[in-house]
Image (spheres, rainbow, N blue to C red):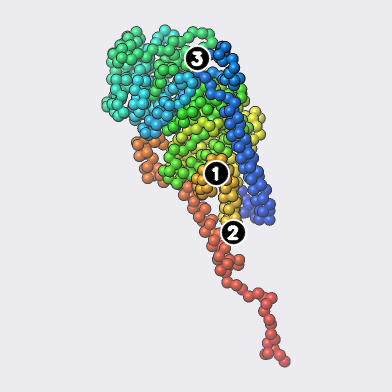
Amino acid sequence: MIWTTPLKIIYSFVISCIFVAPAIIGYILHVQLTRHSFWALGVYGLVVFSFVVLQLIFASLNRCMVAYYRRNQPDPISSSSSFEKNENNVSSSSSSCERRKASKLGLAVVGYREEPGLFAACLESIRHVEYPDPIIMVVVIDGNDPQDAEMAAVFQKIFPTEPVVTLPHLLSDLFTGHPQQLELVQKQLGLPYSQSITLANQSTHEDNSENISIITTDRSVKGENDTIVINNNNNNKKKKKKKPSKIEIIVQERQRQKLQGRHYELESCPTTPTMDPLDKFLHYYTVLPSNTRIVCYMQPHRGKRQAMYTAFRILLAVGCESIVSTDSDTKFDPRAVLELERALHWFPSIGAAAGDVRIWNTMDSALSFMSSLRYWMAFNIERAAQSFNRAVTCVSGPMGIYRASVLREILDDWVTQRFLGLECTYGDDRHLTNRVLLHGKKVVYNHMAFCETETPVTFIRWFKQQTRWSKSFYRELLWNARSLHKHSPWMAAELFYQGMYPFVLMFSIFYILWAHSPWVLLIWLVSLVMVAMIKMVYSVMVSRSLRFLAFPFYSIYYLIGLVPAKLWALISLWDVGWGTSARSASERKRENILWCQVKQSLPVVVWSCLLVAGIAFNILIYFFDPIKGVLAPRLPDPNSIVFYPNPDMIT
């Protein structure tokens, strides 16, 4: 299905009419809602209040559950440790005997043209995470153009002895595309006997991206022999040498490694019948990470989902039992990985776990401060309540962990997701979580594992972020519905509330705005603030922080920004663009073009005009209505007039 411009316009018009039609029909048919408005408000308010109270109860119980397992599940020990007892430790406590060995853990960092300072802070944080065994780490850069080399330079600055590898193919295309493409690549490599590899030149470790030189073995699909390609950012041209044979390629690679004083051996590839063929292919195809080696991969730009797929596939190939995923702007708490891994072992059926995501740029603007409060409540109230019912609906991108056995079953279906005939480019984390839930696995949340990430500081950028998240939420409702019968009824209640509440709110806004009474509007705003204050009191008590006293003011951002973002998300669901751009300087310049800003702010402007017009109408009618207005001229009451007889009429 090809979404042409006329088709996009028709879709947006139809969706808009769906929301406008009830109001138009009600006006034409003179439907009277005022008689039952107080009943409707009372029932609706009771439902919202009950839902919020249950949410707070479940969130509190989840905190108790996390504390219980923290006390009764000691930290895991190294897999190389022995459980054997001797005479000297016979009197040791039973809890020490029950300590389990740590699982083989992988960590994947993915990013696209990240701001160098944020990316460096991310890499520094993962260097200091605590875990009994070495963590196998990979970094995947979604792009291999000269602008993407800046991230590779940052990686080399933080990890100067580790390789940067350029992948000429997307693993998602090789593993889920046409089978003949993978067969052709295997034939070119002469698998299983060829072991030519791609290698990043480590001779320079300058933090300036212009000095980085990446030497790769570009295995062109069209040719029979390999072509050595030198990508140098000072001269972005491909310099092709005479095509040598495969044996010469291997010799040249080994000589280059020897001259550099570093030798990256390929991982020994086992030939057991049970080994996944794709894992075996990767052992021959490229340099793989290990306990002592972190690898940074650069691949053709295709989106975050493709980069995550590459990272997951590589970590699965080296035998990881669980995999932590994060973004390139995230800073980890040292114990975050340890607490995430612990959550996978609360129950046998847990397939994934989420952690607490906080904001590090809280004080950059009033919006970022309000977002930090909203983030805390989204995780420590909403996701915590879902976790108590074992059905967290979204493991957020900044920090989450998945069982490798579950990932193997869902990766290909996840990366090839399509909606309305289009490739899905956003909502990667939510759909991955949905795939886990669809397989009947439980998803939990552990507030003890936390990280910090960046949030937009400008309103338009925040609005685009909320629109993208809302798009993925409404798209994923179709997949949520397929797994509702496998999980707690609370999952259905949460999805219904989150999906319907903004639109019920929107309809009530327009009804009240045109109700000819500003007092009704004021009462409605007070009731909205009261719901926020219930969560505010809970947050102050749990976090012991007075900053949550400002949370009721978030209602302004919710009303002006979040409600139209959800409406615009449905209207523009055909738009698969990411919305917010990367944080590099070049991408920010592109985002600051005046026409782009005007186009992006148009939904907010239209929505704000409707709100202002409704408020103005209410005030004008209240004061200047010719019949009921406060300032309307008072006509004499006919009943108060005394009629005297006309003398001229007296005979």
Residue annotated with mark 2:
519
SS under mark 1: helix
Q: Position of residue 397 (x, y in %)?
A: 49, 31
* Vertical position of residue 605 compared to residue 482: above or below: below
Asked if marks 2 and 3 touch (Cβ < 8 Å), the reply is no
* Quadrant, the C terminus: bottom right
Does the residue at mark 3 contact the one at mark 1 (Cβ under 8 Å)?
Answer: no
Q: Nearer the viewer, residue 89 or 456?
A: 89
Q: Residue at x 33, y 15 (%)?
A: 262
The foreground one among 10 and 306 is: 306
Amino acid of disc 2: Trp
Q: Earlier in the sequence, mark 1 or mark 2?
A: 2
In this figure, which residue is indicated by the disc labeled 1?
Answer: 540
Q: Which residue is mark 3?
A: 80
Mark 2 surroundings: few (<14), some (14-19) or many (≥20) residues within 10 A: some
Dot 3 or dot 1, earlier in sequence: 3
Q: What amino acid type is highlighted by mark number 1?
A: Val
Q: Position of residue 105 (x, y in %)?
A: 49, 21
